Image: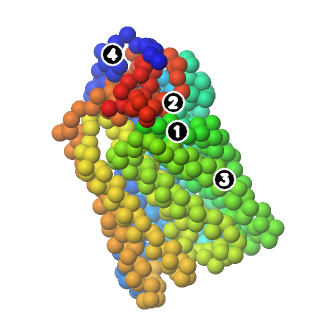
Amino acid sequence: MSTTTFGRAPGASSEPSYLTSENTVVSWLFTRDHKRIALLFFASITFFFFVGGAAATLMRMNLATPQGLLQPSLYNRMFTMHGIIMVWFFLIPSIPTTFGNFFIPMMIGAHDLAFPRVNLLSWYVFNLSGLVVLYALVMGGADTGWTFYTPLSTVYANGYVFAAAMAVFINGFSSIMTALNFVVTIHRLRAPGMTWMRLPLFVWAIYAVSVVMLTATPVLAMDTFLLAVERFIGIGLFDPRHGGDPLLWQHMFWFYSHPAVYIMILPAMGVVSEIIPCYARRPVFGYAGMTTALMSIAILSFFVWAHHMFVAGISLYSSIFFSLATFFVAVPSAIKVFNWTVSLHKGRIVFDAPMLYALGFVLLFTMGGVTGLMLATLAIDVHVHGTYFVVAHFHYIMVGATVSAFFGALHYWWPKMTGRLYPEMWARFAAILTYVGFNLTFFPQFVLGYLGMPRRSYAYPEDWQSWNLLSSAGASILAVAYFLPLLYLGWSLFWERKADANPWRATGLEWITSSPPPKHNFERTPIVQLGPYSYDPENDTFVTQEGTQDAT
């Protein structure tokens, strides 16, 4: 099969790249190019990743000894700010705002997102919310936990709760603008021939998460606004003394925050669905089932929020319903793991860094999913609720899986984004170190939780020190593994070999243009005549929109 849609050699371009077309600071700050805005977001979320990581480092240092090193109030503020910053300023925006911004238009054959000015505005709003949360942090931080449970957050907490809540409120507008842009772009700007069933799975994942963000984020914005008003002037919505109900906050908060877990994990699933076929040289197994599973997860995520509230005082019948619903949402997640596994069967697997990160994602996500089912079981949840078992579970999903996918995407698309390769040996080492460090950090927390160690506690009995020491040692390894790519990827920008248009011999539209891409992505709008993932492991060939090529 051979179809030529361009007048020049694949990857060749007569235009300067998006990096060199203009080089002033003003050109970056007022750019409407989705690729540059993606890099601006990348810089912002990287900054917040290390701020949140610094708070986590202080927490693990404190927990290395039974009596702790920090004052209890300071420890409370550290885990609160760690949670707020990591959830809303790294995990939720990380993949959509960087790789989604950069690659969604290219993967569907468009020249930009539908609303370039709105895209830039979302970055400015994101940074405005970041300044507000940094203000809260510098002034002393909040001490409520990232869940802002009432009446602690509205009546008793002494920190800068109002500023922290307003930071989350403002941040929501950035998410809504980004999601709206993706939905309109995918609906309206697909290249000729790019039907819905020819969309890459990463595009499907970003579409699914955008729908969730558009429907769930306004609820969070309303929640945090009401919480701020309640704390500021005491309207009585959550205060029993004025006829309010603290449980109402938990219902409203988790109605957003459980779908938020899928806001983090759905884009990660999309990334892994791109990497595994490329490095196994096989078509992804069950494409239609994968798209159905993505949309099913997005919809079902709205029906399981109360499984966070089994011990909060909801009725037994409600608990049974939400327990069963949680088991049901596991079905499409299991379908995805099954399809990724089958996609590897009889493939020509190459264990480069993106593949190692993708395999790490599958293993960590499976571990988090299985323990999630344990928490959905009423009797087990009553035993381990509010313990480190829960901490370990959500870190396996939200951090282990999502961050593994983020680094997988970073290595997979690094040559396309920068025009440079990276040192493969160091990248493989960092991927393996991440897996080792993460499991050493969080697996002991399953044991601690089962033994009864409560979360959010700054001190503990001496019998639990060995498990906490293991966890803190793992955190040190994990910190090195997360910091290492910053060094060798930065080094690669200046001294590594230049990348050609398609160094991994992949099939997506983004690989038929030069590395780095020209300002408008494609010199001519491509005409799509094939679905994604046209790999042939038996003949070691693959098919792009230009025709059949050797994989080697």
* 245 w.r.t. 256: above or below: below
Q: Earlier in the sequence, mark 1 or mark 4?
A: 4
| Secondary structure beneath label 2 | loop
Q: Is residue 533 left or right of residue 222?
A: left
Q: Look at 61% across and 59% down and name the residue there.
A: 228
Q: Is residue 260 left or right of residue 512?
A: right
Amino acid, disc 2: Pro
429 or 96, nearer to the observer:
429
Q: Which residue is mark 3?
A: 331
Q: Earlier in the sequence, mark 2 or mark 4?
A: 4
Q: Which residue is mark 2?
A: 532
40 or 241, nearer to the observer:
40
Q: CA distance from mark 3 to mark 1?
A: 19 Å
Q: CA distance from mark 1 to mark 2?
A: 9 Å
- The quarter of the displayed image where residue 323 is located: bottom right
The image position of residue 429, as x and y in percent, is 29, 55
Q: Which residue is mark 1?
A: 284
Q: Which residue is mark 4?
A: 9
